[in-house]
Amino acid sequence: MAPLIPHRRGRLFVIAAASGTGKTSLVKALTAGVPGLGFSVSHTTRPRRPNEVDGRDYHFVDRATFEHMIVAEQFLEYASVFDNLYGTGRAQVEEALEAGRDLLLEIDWQGAQQIRARLPEAIDVFVLPPSRAALGERLAGRRTDSPEVIARRLRDSVTELSHWPEFRYVIVNDEFERALEDLERIVAGDARGLERARPGLATFASSLLD
């Protein structure tokens, strides 16, 4: 009789960052370059941007539908960000992990807190910008938000950035390719030197909050 092969549960990777840090571009490159790494498409009440596709970038729903899903406990996590609601479908994540598939979530710090409480085995990563100035330049360069929204996002970024110590791993997106390599190392299980407690990181992060 052949020996039983133990069931492998998939790994859940959580990536969060302040708005404008380049997180979405990193996530897209990571999922494209790592075979077998799936991406969990979130639900949102945010209006769809011209280059976005429903079901690929987000599941775009109205607020009433989203609130019904909250009551029905269909979200693994959800949060309000800049007056819009974002949430991760519970069923799609559980099905993927039980099937042994690795899955990536791109969420904010509020959602990451909920994921830690419900799935403490999740591997969470926070992405820092190289500077506050770079953050402002990236937000302005999107050309999708009004100046008022950009100014608000910059103010709120201080709150978002302050949550970096809650994450197991922290990377700095100063050079895209290097940041991508750091994420690939974390997925591969070789995250040495990327822990939040590494020398110099706290001082650098403090400079972003001043």
Image (cartoon, rainbow, N blue to C red):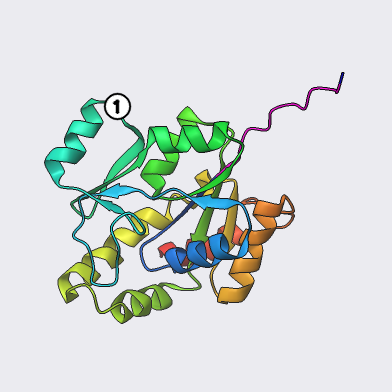
* Residue at image location 37% in from the left, 43% down from the top: 110
Magenta highlight on residue 6: yes
Q: Is residue 67 above or below residue 31?
A: above
Q: Is residue 139 above or below residue 192?
A: below
In the rendered structure, the answer to whether residue 9 lies left or right of residue 95 reads right
- Residue 135, given in percent of the width and then of the height, sits at 39, 73
Q: Is residue 129 above or below residue 66?
A: below
Magenta segment main secondary structure: loop
- Residue 165, given in percent of the width and then of the height, sits at 52, 48
Q: Which residues are magenta?
A: 2-12
Magenta highlight on residue 13: no
* Residue at image location 86% in from the left, 23% down from the top: 2
* Residue at image location 39% in from the left, 33% down from the top: 90
**Viewer-nearest residue: 12 or 82:** 12
- Residue 45, given in percent of the width and then of the height, sits at 20, 50
**Viewer-nearest residue: 133 or 18:** 18
The kind of residue on which mark 1 rests is Glu
**Viewer-nearest residue: 11 or 153:** 11
Which quarter of the rendering shows the C terminus?
A: bottom left
Dot 1, how many residues are within 10 Å of its Cα: few (below 14), some (14-19), or many (20+)?
Answer: few
Q: Which residue is mark 1?
A: 73
Q: Is residue 200 visible?
A: no
* Residue at image location 49% in from the left, 33% down from the top: 95
- Residue 207, given in percent of the width and then of the height, sits at 48, 67
> Which image quadrant is residue 159 in?
bottom left
Direction top: furthest residue: 1
